[in-house]
């Protein structure tokens, strides 16, 4: 009997399996206390900018039905400190590193991309979709013209493949996807968080100091699956699917919708071993269904 083969080619990167971590929910040192990071297909690191960012005022996190709100605001130590610390630590593992990049302007994105292009990262994920920063972020991701402009700018200075992370807070996500594909994006990741809000009715105040924040978790999964399905039919480039993946069958659902690889985000904040648990559940699902490869899952979808 032939063994399972979970390996995938993703925008030119060889991955041993399609399970990755979602940006903002993964720390190499923290996660490494709970499982072997080398088991994952790739890791996507927390967003990093050309210079350090302080992030938003606290409180930044709030629980909701079926998920959570966050307004961290891309707090990060800057590209130089990231390279010297987090990236240096990750070198010991045989897992590709995808560095998430943030910026307030095209120039800031390009400065960070230039620094990270000189490192061992396998790919850069350009975050044009964060709802928690007042400049850049989602402002670029909701306008096809600006999304194209950022993609063109970073492609002109990057020595690594570029993955553009899209926001669901738009009317037609396929227009944004087609715009970044046309400017040379090597892949797309979707979805980032939905813009949400929660009010503490006892205190009569918003739960988050930022008032609104990014909503993630299992409640957004149907939205994410729908958008992966739509984008898969609009572009030819590879897709990283994420948004509320909690189980191996959730991962299979995204692959059937059109994702080439998947990311685990909020689940890892609830259960630190969720990425490897989901990998093992995906393997069990494949054995149960008689699938031998990841392509078998996608080809079985009849929608």
Image (cartoon, rainbow, N blue to C red):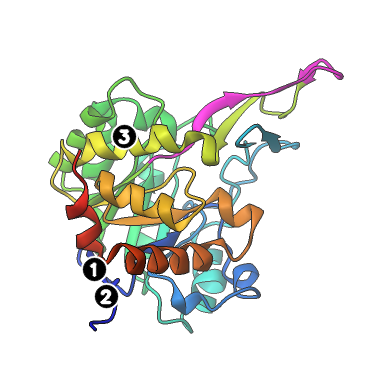
User: Which image quadrant: the C terminus?
Assistant: top left
Horizontal side of 203 relative to 22 (left or right) equals right
Q: Which residue is label 2 attached to?
A: 5
Instruction: Say whether disc 1 or disc 2 marks the residue closer to the N-terminus.
Output: 2
* Residue at image mark 3: 227
Mark with earlier residue (1, 3): 3
Look at the numbered discs 1 and 2 and tell me whether their residues touch, using CB distance below 8 Å: yes
Mark 2 against mark 3, which lies toward the viewer?
2
Q: Is residue 33 left or right of residue 78?
A: right
- Residue 263 appearing in the image: yes
Q: Estimate the spatial distance between the alpha carbons at disc 1 and disc 3, rounded to whole Å.
A: 24 Å
Q: Residue at x 64, y 59 (%)?
A: 271
- Is 197 in the magenta? yes
Q: Position of residue 197 (x, y in %)?
A: 63, 23
Q: Residue at x 56, y 33 (%)?
A: 215
Label 1 neighbourhood size at 10 Å, few (<14), some (14-19), many (20+)?
some
Which region shows up in magenta? 191-205
Q: Mark 1 = which residue?
A: 293
Q: Which residue corresponds to the image point at 55% horizontal and 34% vertical from the top-left?
A: 214
Horizontally, is 273 left or right of 49 in the view? right
The numbered mark, 2 or 3, whose residue comes first in the sequence reads 2
Q: Nearer the viewer, residue 10 or 99?
A: 10
């Amino acid at each position: 009997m032939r063994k399972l083969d979970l390996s995938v080619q993703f925008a030119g990167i060889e991955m041993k399996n399609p399970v990755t971590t979602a940006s903002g929910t993964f720390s190499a040192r923290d996660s490494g206390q709970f499982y072997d990071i080398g088991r994952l297909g790739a890791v996507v690191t927390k967003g990093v900018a050309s210079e350090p960012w302080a992030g938003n005022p606290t409180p930044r996190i709030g629980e909701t039905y079926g998920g959570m709100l966050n307004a961290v605001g891309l707090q990060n130590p800057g590209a130089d400190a990231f390279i010297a610390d987090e990236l240096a630590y990750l070198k010991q593992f045989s897992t590709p590193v995808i560095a998430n990049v943030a910026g307030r302007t095209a120039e800031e994105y390009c400065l960070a991309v230039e620094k990270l292009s000189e490192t061992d990262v396998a790919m850069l994920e350009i975050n044009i979709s964060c709802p928690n920063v007042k400049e850049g972020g989602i402002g670029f991701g909701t306008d096809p013209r600006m999304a194209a402009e950022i993609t063109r700018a970073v492609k002109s200075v990057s020595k690594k493949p570029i993955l553009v992370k899209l926001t669901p807070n738009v009317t037609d996500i396929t227009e944004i996807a087609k715009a970044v594909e046309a400017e040379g994006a090597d892949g797309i990741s979707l979805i980032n968080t939905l813009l949400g809000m929660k009010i503490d009715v006892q205190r009569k105040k918003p739960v988050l100091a930022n008032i609104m924040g990014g909503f993630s978790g299992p409640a957004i999964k149907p939205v994410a699956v729908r958008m992966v399905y739509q984008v898969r039919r609009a572009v030819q480039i590879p897709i990283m699917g994420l948004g509320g993946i909690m189980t191996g069958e959730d991962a299979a659902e995204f692959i059937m919708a059109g994702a080439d690889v998947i990311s685990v985000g909020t689940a890892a904040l609830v259960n630190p071993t969720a990425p490897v648990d989901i990998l093992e559940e995906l393997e069990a699902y494949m054995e149960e269904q008689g699938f031998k490869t990841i392509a078998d899952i996608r080809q079985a979808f009849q929608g």
